[in-house]
Amino acid sequence: MRVLRLKDVMEMSGLARSTIYKYINADTFPRPIPLGGRSVGWVDSEVHEWIAAKIKNRDIENHQ
């Protein structure tokens, strides 16, 4: 298991910091895990699953 920092999540998802936190607050993006102090990270597999779900939804919408 790998823990991603915000910069990595932004690069993987293509989302800005503010958008990531907006989606977290809306419960539509994986929640970060506390790493100590003010540091947080995201579980790599959860971010990959979120991206895969976006791709799947895109493909379903395009075939309707």
Image (cartoon, grey):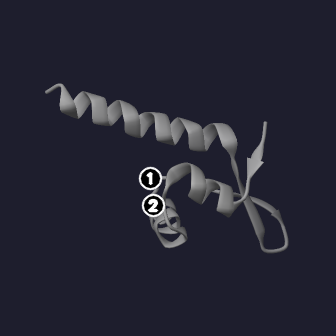
Q: Is residue 56 visible?
A: yes
Q: Which residue is mark 2?
A: 23
Rendering coords of residue 53 (x, y %):
43, 35
- Quadrant into which the N terminus falls: top right
Observer-nearest residue: 8 or 21? 8
Q: Quadrant of residue 9?
A: bottom right
Tell whether 44 sits left or right of 53: right
Observer-nearest residue: 52 or 36? 52
Amino acid type of the residue that numbered disc 1 sits on in the rendered structure: Thr
Q: Quadrant of residue 35?
A: bottom right
Disc on the earlier residue, 1 or 2: 2
Q: Residue at x 46, y 55 (%)?
A: 27
Q: Which mark is residue 28?
A: 1
Q: Residue at x 50, y 67 (%)?
A: 16
Observer-nearest residue: 27 or 23? 23
Give the SS element for disc 2.
helix
Observer-nearest residue: 57 or 62? 62
